[in-house]
Image (cartoon, rainbow, N blue to C red):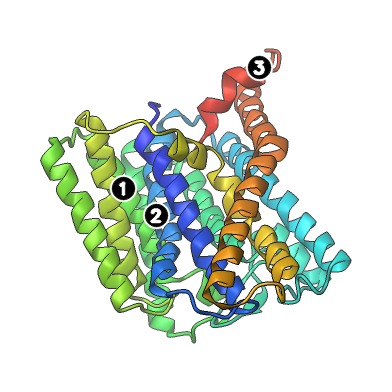
């Protein structure tokens, strides 16, 4: 499968957006709360961009998958191993530094469920695993299971079957009218699941030869940015039925526009965005730990708007550094492991590949 530089950059932008959104939330508990809220609210759209990207990329990748076991083991190695590591580190941190992680309550059952990608920890208007950003990974794992199941079908029916299953789950959620945050059934029937379908549709159009010039591609990106601006002006609840409209559609337009712009030769290279894209998953997983520790260290030592800005910059710097270190120590080996799993399942008699040859192949 070809590499999309635009998607790589979007991953970095999405992860940075989520970091900014959560940074303000942490600072509200420690700073003087003088930062403009709207500047970081849009960061929550990062998860919507991730969902659309996942639907797009994995639809393209499915054509090279040879079996359900290979696909799921590859996903667990690529996505699960880093997530499990961060979850266990967070659990250890809450035991060692409870004052810095006072908002992280969990039990032994919560830990087992979290490691199984099942949310159980009650949050404000929602539930999540112990690692709160992991709620998106629980939905991702559901998507992976549906994709793996679709491999038993003819290739021409797979995308339609997965999309139908996702829409059916959302339909069940709408019919049940469960209260927001009302348990596992509510969680796995959220309307946000439709955003995977947006990515699937974009991928299918791309596979069928959908291409445009730079002008139409830029127009889609402009519409996406306008849509996000409207979403900030009239922010809905994070998990309401309107989220696929207010955040999902702009995210889909942004993904489509950037992919088309790259195809039209209008994309660019940027080292900062390339770096953010490379560490995006590690940054997404680890930033809450960095934010909690930074806020705890600086609380009481800074005040006013200037103090809030100092805390924000320090928190972002710590999160970026932590994300990079985690990428080198954990995610990069996990990428290699995913490549090994894929290669050995396809060629059981071959020797393990060299990590440098395979890491780039598994950034999906």
In the displayed structure, 160 sits above or below 94; it is above
Q: Is residue 263 above or below residue 136?
A: above
Residue 262 visible somewhere in the drawing = yes
Residue pointed to by mark 2: 49
Which residue is at the front of the view, 56 or 228? 228
Q: Is residue 239 or residue 286 the one in the foreground?
A: 286
Residue at the spot x=36%, y=79% of the render?
236
Mark 3 in CB contact with mark 2 (< 8 angstroms):
no
Q: CA distance from mark 1 to mark 3?
A: 32 Å
User: Which of the two discs, 3 and 2, labels the residue nearer the N terminus?
Assistant: 2
Q: Where does the image place residue 297, in percent across and percent down from the top left? A: 75, 66
Q: Residue at x 81, y 67 (%)?
A: 94
* Residue 48 percent across, percent down from the top left: 40, 59
**Residue 293: x and y, percent?**
73, 63
Q: Is residue 264 above or below residue 305?
A: above
Q: Position of residue 216 (x, y in %)?
A: 12, 44
Which tag, 1 or 3, sits closer to the chain's start? 1
Name the side, left or right, on which 133 lies relative to 95.
Answer: left
Q: Are marks 2 and 1 in contact (CB under 8 Å)?
A: yes
Numbered mark located on residue 325 in the image? none
Residue 246 sits in which quadrant? bottom left
**Which residue occupies the extreme right position in the image?**
96
- What residue is pinned by disc 3? 353
**Number of numbered callouts drawn:** 3
Check disc 3: other Cα within 10 Å, few if <14, some if 14-19, many if 20+. Answer: some
Residue 255, disc: 1
């Amino acid at each position: 499968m070809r590499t999309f530089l635009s998607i790589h950059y979007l991953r970095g932008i999405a992860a940075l957006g989520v970091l900014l959104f959560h940074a303000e939330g942490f600072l509200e508990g420690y700073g003087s709360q003088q930062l403009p809220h709207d500047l970081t609210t849009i960061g929550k759209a990062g998860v919507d961009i991730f969902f659309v990207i996942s639907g797009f990329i994995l639809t393209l990748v499915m054509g090279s998958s040879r079996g359900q076991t290979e696909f799921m083991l590859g996903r667990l190695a690529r996505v699960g191993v880093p997530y499990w590591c961060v979850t266990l580190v967070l659990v250890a941190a809450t035991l060692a530094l409870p004052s810095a992680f006072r908002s992280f309550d969990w039990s032994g059952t919560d830990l087992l469920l979290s490691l199984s990608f099942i949310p159980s920890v009650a949050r404000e208007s929602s539930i999540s695993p112990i690692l709160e950003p992991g709620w998106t990974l629980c939905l991702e794992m559901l998507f992976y299971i549906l994709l793996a199941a679709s491999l038993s079908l003819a290739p021409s029916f797979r995308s339609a079957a997965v999309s139908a299953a996702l829409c059916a789950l959302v339909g069940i959620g709408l019919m049940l009218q469960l209260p927001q945050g009302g348990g596992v059934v509510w969680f796995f029937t959220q309307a946000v699941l439709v955003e995977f379908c947006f990515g699937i549709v974009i991928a299918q159009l791309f596979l069928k030869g959908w291409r445009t010039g730079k002008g139409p591609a830029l127009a889609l990106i402009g519409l996406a940015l306008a849509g996000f601006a409207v979403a900030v002006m009239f922010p809905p609840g994070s998990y309401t039925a309107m989220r696929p409209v207010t955040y999902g559609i702009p995210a889909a337009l942004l993904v489509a526009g950037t992919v088309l712009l790259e195809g039209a030769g209008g994309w660019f290279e940027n080292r900062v965005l390339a770096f953010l894209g490379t560490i995006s998953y590690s940054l997404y997983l680890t930033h809450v730990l960095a934010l909690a520790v930074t806020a705890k260290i600086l609380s009481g030592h800074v005040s006013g708007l200037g103090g809030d800005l100092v805390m924000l910059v320090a928190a972002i710097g710590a999160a970026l550094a932590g994300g990079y270190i985690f990428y080198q120590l954990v995610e990069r080996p996990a990428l290699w492991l995913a490549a090994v799993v894929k290669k050995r399942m396809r060629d059981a008699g071959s020797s393990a590949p060299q990590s440098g040859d395979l890491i780039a192949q598994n950034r999906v």
